[in-house]
Image: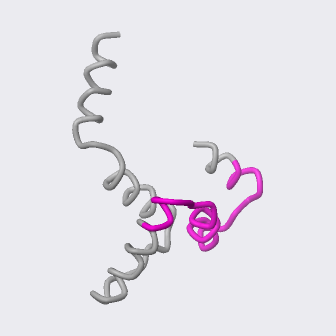
Amino acid sequence: MKIEQLFACHHTSEERKVPLATLSFQGYALYWWTSLVMERMIHRDLLVKYWNDLKSALRKRHIPSYYEIELMDKLQRL
């Protein structure tokens, strides 16, 4: 991912990765992020603090469950 290259280039600390990444969200992504934060606050769940947790949440929301299976099928056909 391009953002991970930027993090590496600028030696971004783990604490700053989520705020920096979400700063560039626009449109539906910003709406989704705001809703996620509010929902976690309401339910008193832990907020997303780490980059890997944000990537997991993004994948869960925006990548269909069958996509990983399709990628594995393509890999096996190579």
In the image, is 26 to the left or to the right of 73?
right
Q: Nearer the viewer, residue 32 or 16?
A: 32
Residue lying at the far right in this picture: please name it.
10
The quadrant in which residue 20 appears is: bottom right
Residue lying at the far top in this picture: please name it.
78
Task: Count the numbered circles shown.
Answer: 0
Q: Give percent across and percent down for residue 39.
A: 33, 80
Q: How is the image coloured?
A: one colour
Q: Quadrant of the C terminus?
A: top left
> Which span of residues is magenta-colored?
6-31
Q: Give percent across and percent down for residue 1.
A: 57, 42
Up-down relation of residue 74 to residue 43 (above or below): above
Q: Residue at image x 71%, y 51%? A: 6
Residue lying at the far front in this picture: please name it.
27
Residue 23 magenta-drawn? yes
Q: Residue at image x 45%, y 68%? A: 31
Q: Nearer the viewer, residue 47 or 25?
A: 25
The quadrant in which residue 13 appears is: bottom right
- By secondary structure, the bulk of the magenta-drawn segment is best described as helix
Up-down relation of residue 28 to residue 67 (above or below): below
Q: Residue at image x 28%, y 16%? A: 76
In the image, is 51 to the left or to the right of 20?
left
In the image, is 48 to the left or to the right of 11?
left
Q: Residue at image x 38%, y 73%? A: 36
